[in-house]
Image (cartoon, rainbow, N blue to C red):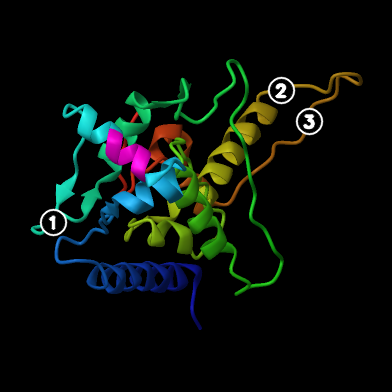
Amino acid sequence: MFTHADLAKLQTQSLKMQGFIRQQTFSPEMEKTLRRFSSWEVAELILKINPSTLRGRLAADPSLPQGLVEEDGRQRWYTLEEINELRRRLRIKNQPLMPPRPEGKRAIRAAIANFKGGAGKSTVALHFAHAAALDGYRVLCVDFDPQATLSHSMGLSDVPEEYTVWGIMARDLIRETERMNATSAGAESGTALPQRKLPPSVTGMGLNGLRITDFIKPTCWPTIDL
């Protein structure tokens, strides 16, 4: 008969093995890298301007990022850092290429959810996040999937369970329980309230001291403050 400790040990071993397998699927540096984009992709798909307009601006201002030029000189390839530099500096018809960010407004929030497994939620969220990043937005992905498929797709190959959404929920549960137990009497009757108890599997993991920054992990995508 397996005990709770046995199951916890098996889970730890399983997560370690999953992390090892995922690392082997990455590049030799064990990280995913973002490819370069052609000048046509930069103009038509990302900046949404005429390719000839982009070529003219690059020829007129050599200080702009010129990208990696092929040997025959017929094609240029740009990194995301260079694309964002072009986005910051170029103006088309006196209009900036920076994405709109209304002053004082909250961030746009989008949820990809479905009660059925294998419906493509993580894939949709991944492509949506990539598209927003290529459009020049700062993107924060919140992975609520206990399988952490989105996190792994972003290049995070080894994420401990306590540093997932479960860790945040457990931390808040501990703090709320402590707050309620600190109340000596009911608000109206004045009678003592029962003390609430949490299992050691929650209280014994040291989650109460976790900070928000412990849950935010940088991905292999370039971090650029626009």
Q: Is residue 191 above or below residue 76?
A: above
Residue 200 spot, x, y in % from top left = 52, 51
Magenta run includes residue 216: no
Q: Nearer the viewer, residue 202 or 46?
A: 46
- Per the image, label 1 sits on a secondary structure element best described as loop
Residue 87 spot, x, y in % from top left = 37, 32
- Per the image, label 2 sits on a secondary structure element best described as loop
Residue indicated by mark 2: 183
Q: Quadrant of residue 75?
A: bottom left
Neighbourhood count class around disc 1 (C-alpha, 10 Å): few under 14, some 14–19, many 20 upward: few
Q: Magenta segment, which residues?
A: 52-56
Using the numbered discs, state the Cα–Cα distance from disc 1 to disc 2 in whole angstroms.
70 Å
Label whose residue precedes the other's in the sequence (3 or 2): 2
Q: Residue at x 64, y 27 (%)?
A: 179
Please name the amino acid that badge 1 sits on: Glu
Residue indicated by mark 1: 70
Please name the amino acid that badge 2 sits on: Thr
* Residue 211 can be seen, yes or no: no
Label whose residue precedes the other's in the sequence (1 or 2): 1
- Which of pointers 3 and 1 indicates the residue nearer the eye? 1
Side of 184 where 81 appears, left or right = left
Q: Are marks 3 and 2 in contact (CB under 8 Å)?
A: yes
For residue 193, the mark is 3
Q: Residue at x 43, y 49 (%)?
A: 44
- Per the image, label 3 sits on a secondary structure element best described as loop
Q: Nearer the viewer, residue 39 or 59?
A: 59
Which residue extends farthest right? 189
Please name the amino acid that badge 3 sits on: Leu
Label whose residue precedes the other's in the sequence (3 or 1): 1
